[in-house]
Image (cartoon, helix red, strand yellow):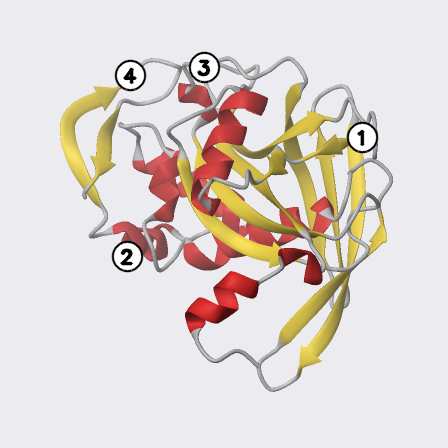
Amino acid sequence: MYESEEEFLKNYNPDEFKKLSMTVDILIISVSNEEVSNYRKTDKKKMSILLVKRDNYPFKEKWCLPGGFVNIDENLDDAPKRILKSETNLENIYLEQLYTFGNIDRDPRMRIVSTSYLALIDKNSLNESISQNSSWFDVVSIDDAKDKVNIILNNGKESINFTIKKVLREQTTDRYSYEIEQNDKLAFDHPKVILAGIERLKNKIEYTDIVFNMMPKLFTLGELQQVYEVILGKKLLDPAFRRIIANKVEKTSKMKTGEGHRPSYLFKYKN
């Protein structure tokens, strides 16, 4: 036993401890316009996720979330900012820690624990071009059954389909753990990260202002309502929606005109 802190540090041998590595994975979600052919109709909204195609083993040629190792001299929250810039050419976007994934067999290379981050963006307003090996995948469907969730993604050229099994952990709190039941195109345990991020966004949208990180500076109430509906996966009655956003937006004197529909006032986030 050591007699003091100084004695411990003097005799401390880091090789006595088994090592693990730390990574970060970033789930980037956008809700943006899906152009429609009829100019009289308002553009529909769609949720999209940014994926990167791996060019190295393991999981070479499979899609994954942007991510990478945390440098030994780097603060944890600085890692996703660096990785976003290098892998996707994106910077200065909203980020929050999502969850830490640490299953022993989640990475075939070594013992790796990953802290995932949720990033939100309005990709219609992007000034940067994403990297060549990155692609936006639309969330085509989320089939949430009692004991499993099936999600389909598509980027216009390729479809990704995965299924997550839900296992009830605590009946009194309705808490579940998740197991990947079917997945053939996503690397690592990233199907679980995607599901966790979508559920976090869905849970926070009604009691926080998080949605405005996905909106342009000016928007119509109809556009904002569509974003809420896409994230929540359900239609909202106008009175209920107006109550949700009553103290969150501010009407401007500007209007959106043209595009085959009546002019609408533009609003902005009331921060």
Q: Position of residue 230 (x, y in %)?
A: 52, 43
Q: Earlier in the sequence, mark 1 or mark 4?
A: 1
Q: Earlier in the sequence, mark 2 or mark 4?
A: 2
Q: Residues within 10 Å of mark 1 (few under 14, many from 20)?
A: some
Q: Is residue 180 visible?
A: yes
Q: Earlier in the sequence, mark 1 or mark 3?
A: 1
* Numbered badge on residue 62: 1
Which quarter of the picture shows residue 18?
bottom right
Q: Amino acid at mark 1?
A: Lys
Mark 2 secondary-structure assignment: helix
Q: Residues within 10 Å of mark 3 (few under 14, many from 20)?
A: few
Q: Is residue 125 left or right of residue 243?
A: right
**Mark in front: 2 vs 1:** 1
Marks 3 and 4, how far apart in space?
27 Å
Mark 3 secondary-structure assignment: loop
As drawn, 167 above or below 75:
below
Residue at the spot 22% in from the left edge and 34% down from the top edge: 268
Q: Amino acid at mark 3?
A: Glu
